Amino acid sequence: MTDHEDLRELRLRRFRPVAAVRTAEHQVPRARFPAIDVHNHLGRWLTSGWAAPDVGALLEMMDAANVAAIVNLDGMRGEELRANLDRYDRAHPGRFVTFAQVDWREVARGEGSGERLATQLREAVDAGARGLKVWKDLGLHLRDDGGVLIAPDDERLSPLWEMAGDVGVPVLIHTGDPVAFFDPMDGGNERIEELLEHPDWWFGDRARFPAFDDLLGAFERLVASHPRTTFIGAHVAGASEDLAWVGRMLETYPNLHVDLAARIAELGRQPRATRALLERHPTRILFGTDEFPPMQEVYAIHFRFLETADESFAYSIEDPPPQGRWAISGLDLPDDVLRAVYRENALRLISGLDPS
């Protein structure tokens, strides 16, 4: 008899289970309809250099995957915005559009910060930006001149949101993070491996960070208070684990849309609820990946998730998968929903994309 006593002490990081189920497999290297990735990073904000070092190679990959266009969220402001616009939007019109960011350091500079941020947005749009990207540091890290945490619905920021409505650009806003990032760091946390790799992603310290539900409440008040402004809630509005809440938000606020970026791991383990959400709100949900640099094999997983009824397949090319040790199942969406999610909703909300 073989002695497997050593396996009783097997470390989780060495555990690589191979699924025993045998299921249908359909590889989808190309989207069924031209797709627009509304949530990606092609600039230098999150990387040491350009996230897509070779734009020609990127375009070839996009053509092979039937990705018609990518929204680049790394425009930042000033000279960096102009560099992104020159590299992508102006060099390849219709294939790329760039969103700007504002200088959130203004919130610590006292009175009039909202007006100054609004001016920055207007100048960015005049320069060619097609939207505003807001990161999760609003609500989690940004503090005013008195050291008080700034919530997304802080009234002092109203001029910024109203400016977005005035100039007709959407606000793609990332609020919070997966709910497990706000839970205790213990053996019951389903994202414990990810948090051990990235301890700065844990927001469970209530002395430093707001509760998850408080952030969602602030996000709802923000959307409700600015009905003329189009909001795209990044990562399924930050609540991919609670699709009933997302559905209620979409039913209540016609100015709210959501993207699917970086959340197929969550959505794919609740495929029936996810398909029901997309079928109820096909005009309000946009395709996005947040996977950079963009790769065809990663797009193929997203296409398989949206287009097939395959079960129990990997949501990532990484091993172990980065967001949790589970598999996902496909949605098998009907063509009319696919067209809307892949392309039509983005064309309606974001200017500068090539409708052909």
Image: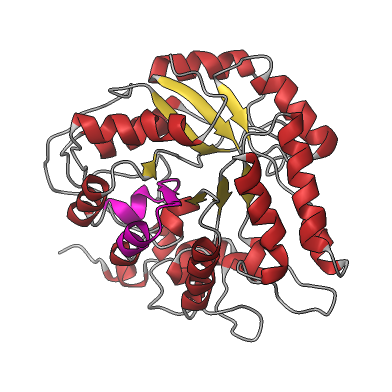
Residue at x 83%, y 80% (from the top left corner): 146
Residue at x 40%, y 58% (from the top left corner): 253
Q: Quadrant of residue 187?
A: bottom left
Q: Is residue 238 left or right of residue 45?
A: left
**Residue 171 x/y as whole percent:** 58, 48
Work out whether residue 294 can be spotted. Answer: yes
Q: Quadrant of residue 352?
A: top right
**Residue 122 x/y as whole percent:** 75, 42
- Is residue 259 a member of the stretch shown in magenta? yes
Q: In this view of the protein, which residue sits in the foreground, 53 or 13?
A: 53
Work out whether residue 16 can be spotted. Answer: no
Q: How is the image coloured?
A: secondary structure
**Residue 51 x/y as whole percent:** 65, 32
Report how many numbered discs are placed on residues in the image: 0
Residue at x 75%, y 38% (from the top left corner): 124
Q: In this view of the protein, which residue sits in the foreground, 188 or 215?
A: 215
- Is residue 28 a member of the stretch shown in magenta? no
Specify start and end residues of the magenta stretch as a single range. 246-268
- Image quarter where the N terminus lies is bottom left
**Image: 59 above or below 127:** above
Q: In this view of the protein, which residue sits in the foreground, 69 or 340?
A: 340
**Residue 117 x/y as whole percent:** 77, 54
Q: Residue most toward the bottom?
A: 207
**Image: 221 above or below 32:** below
